[in-house]
Amino acid sequence: MSVNMEVTEKPKSQETEPDVPSDLNEPQIPESAKQRPLLVDIPVTDDTAALNLMVGFLNVAQRRGAFNFRESGKIGECIQRFVRQPTPEQVAAALESQNATVAAAAAAETTN
């Protein structure tokens, strides 16, 4: 039994990409991330802005896998120290505003 075989190389210009949908070649960016400004473009105008930017950069580092589980937990604990819970007055004002908006929308709907 004899096998005859010929091997030739394709020129680079004739090589084709594998059949992969083009949207798989591009990184997937959530719609909300497309609308937000980059952290590096936000000016540091005061202490609050500086702290918020540091928290933002820590979140980016965490998503990239920079911290282990225990470190992530400790960072989360530190961030919670700076997250201010709304006062009962702020909650009441927000609910009142929301209720007024709903009532106005309902009134406008009944007049149409």
Image: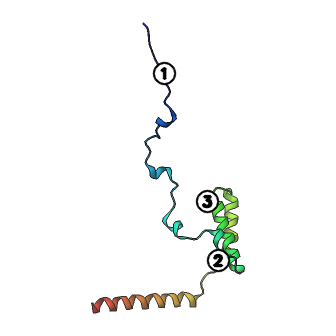
Q: Which residue is mark 3?
A: 63
Q: CA distance from mark 3 to mark 2?
A: 20 Å
Q: Which residue is mark 1?
A: 7
Mark carried by residue 35: none
Mark 1 vs mark 3: in front: 1
Residue at left offset 53%, top offset 66%: 33
**Picture coordinates of residue 60 (x, y %)?**
63, 63
SS at mark 2? loop
Q: CA distance from mark 1 to mark 2?
A: 67 Å
**Picture coordinates of residue 4 (x, y %)?**
44, 13
**Picture coordinates of residue 106 (x, y %)?**
34, 89
SS at mark 1? loop
In the shown orientation, is residue 73 left or right of residue 102? Answer: right
- What is the quadrant of residue 105 in the picture? bottom left
Say if 40 sits above or below 110 in the image: above
Q: How is the image coloured?
A: rainbow
Mark 3 vs mark 2: in front: 3
Q: Nearer the viewer, residue 8 or 76?
A: 8
Q: Quarter of the image containing the N terminus?
A: top left
Amino acid of disc 2 = Val
Of pointers 1 and 3, the one earlier in the residue sequence:
1
Q: Residues within 10 Å of mark 3 (few under 14, many from 20)?
A: few
Of pointers 3 and 2, the one earlier in the residue sequence:
3
Residue at left offset 45%, top offset 50%: 22
Amino acid of disc 1 = Val
SS at mark 3? helix
Report the residue that reaches farthest toward the left: 112
**Picture coordinates of residue 90 (x, y %)?**
57, 88
Residue at left offset 29%, top offset 90%: 110
Q: Which residue is mark 2?
A: 83
Contact, mark 1 vs mark 2 (Cβ under 8 Å): no
Amino acid of disc 3 = Arg
